[in-house]
Image (spheres, rainbow, N blue to C red):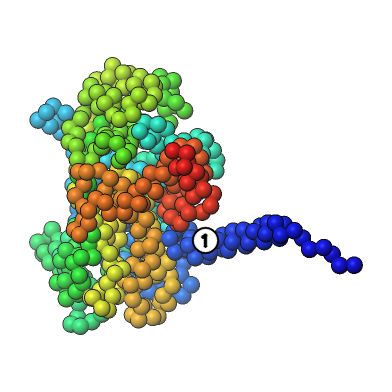
Amino acid sequence: MVAEPLPSWQVAAATLSVSSILLYGIGRLVRARILVPKYTILHDIHVAGKPRNDGLIPGRAIVCGGSVSGLLAAAVCGDHFESVVVIEPEQWANEHGTDLPHQQEYRTLPDGHREPIVARTRIMQYNALHFFLTPVLMGLEALFPELDDELDKFGYTRRQVIIRSRMRGIPIPDPFDEGDPNAPKSLTITREHYETLVRRLLVRSRKNITFVTGTVTGFIREAGAPALTGVTISTREPELRKQNLDGRFIVDATGRQQISYDKCLRQANFDFPPSIRIEYDPHVVYSQSVRTIPAQYHATLNAIIPHGFVPGVRYSHTPDWKTPEQRAIWVVLYQGSQLIICMGAWGVDLPLHTITEVRPYVTSLYGAEHIPTWFLELLDWLEAHDDEFSPWSKVIKPGPLNWIQYQNVDDTNGTLPNNWVAVGDAVMRLNPVYGQGCSKANVDAITLDAVLRAIPSNSFEAANVSRSFFEAEGPRVAGAWDGTKSSDYGFKSTNAADGETLDKDKFGREFGHAIQKAGMKHRDVQLAFLHVVMFLAPATDFFSPWVLGKVLFDQLLG
């Protein structure tokens, strides 16, 4: 007996089902095996901080700069080289950088407002508002097994990452409820406390690292050699005014000074096209008003602020580039009961200091009709009690932003030393209002660890560390650069990079806007957005069917 053939529609349906399952499986496999390792640090971070299998690389590594990116790079180098020297220009950092000041000192400005006297004079944002995303905590946990002990000493705890975004004043729900144990976590501490924590961890865990107070003024290279042999430094001591320091591996962590690009590489006769530095200026300025709230008022603020007076982002109102608005405001509570009200703007001056000045600013924002009543009540309460808190304020103008795309230097257009890398702001300066800079420094550190770990100790001379590092680092940080730059280009006051206009990547800007709009309704879309922004997922996740379908559906509905 011959079975009757299935109807054609059933055959088609079965074929479509099987094909969909196969495509889904292939997509998951490609994501796990190719996309995640290429665009994130999630695979590499599991081995970071562990001993090398074949022993340390002989010789000394030199880290130029002892701020956050330099300290993280020094921790990585300490796991791979026999010795490490960190050259830090500020004597205070080397002598007192493992201790927090017991009492902050202030100066009074001509307008009568107070501003803190900053010990780290070369770090513009040393006491400025910072958002520490999940990679910051992941990096510390991987590199420093002593982290919990140091957190306990300072009284810090891991906290859930809460963004509390708003578009046009309308809330975009966080993908996790507050208190959800599965939510990503990080630290809610000041930038000053974070750098102090990292330096303490480094000093405690890596005994092969020493600190020198001085300024790197040049790189040393033997004629025609493919590698550097050391650096020249200037020190404050008259008898050691200038000296050469031999090194087998050099890390530029000089931040906005970017000494490699601006002078040191060319002085050592390495050449590359100046066009590898892409630079634009969003004319961003932000003004923060800071006060420490005494314990007797915590119960009152617990009743005013939804979810209580607990560390984290309590309110966020950012501009939508499709509207005329170019201003933002954030309310953040740090551990230690430090409450920060931060106003930020593109192309608008913000000399705001007092609550009296903040209120008309808030109520004039686009979407002010959506501002919750509790926020206005908070401003009222602060204004009534502000004399008791001795608030201080600070205005910060980051200036132009850039990405030096060293990964684009090859044998056809120039040369780079094969035993040198640049990390942190020395290679990419991101817009600080998006809060990704310190996370990016951790991405650099973990990437560097993976590159060094792949080089056998006895064949370091033959390796091209520079090329391997920048080829791996570039794809992992490109999304942060492209996304923030595209967003900044939505504001008319931005000066575009040479050869570009503000219409550059308009599709990406429109698509990002559509994702955020869909995130208002769909938590899984907002979760994908949060993971990509935090360097925890490849941007290709935006094109997965479960995200793209909801984005397109919402666009069709208007």
Residue 140 visible in the current orientation:
no
> Which quadrant would residue 392 be assigned to in this image?
top left
List the single residue furthest toward the bottom: 224
Residue 520 is left or right of residue 297, and the answer is right
> In the image shown, does 163 or 130 lie closer to the viewer?
163
**Residue 94, placed above or below residue 180:** below
The residue that mark 1 highlights is: 31
Q: Quadrant of residue 12?
A: bottom right
* Amino acid under disc 1: Arg
| SS under mark 1 | helix
Res 407 seen here = yes
Q: Is residue 116 above or below residue 39?
A: above
x and y, in percent, of residue 200 in the image: 35, 51
Q: Nearer the viewer, residue 470 or 389?
A: 470
Q: Is residue 17 above or below residue 493?
A: below
Instruction: Tell me if mark 1 has few (under 14), some (14-19) or many (20+) residues whose alpha carbon lies within 10 angstroms of its own.
Output: some
Please name whichever residue, 498 or 260, is drawn nearer the observer in this view of the structure: 498
Which residue extends farthest top? 384
Query: At 43% across and 55% down in the image, what residue appears?
Result: 539
Is residue 281 toward the left or the right of residue 179 in the image? left
Q: Is residue 414 above or below residue 558?
A: below
Residue 252 in picture, x, y percent from top left:
25, 63
Q: Position of residue 211 (x, y in %)?
A: 26, 59
For the C terminus, the image quarter is: top left
Q: At 21% from the left edge and 29% from the top edge, which residue is drawn?
A: 353
**In this view of the protein, which residue sits in the foreground, 224 or 397?**
397
The N terminus lies in quadrant: bottom right
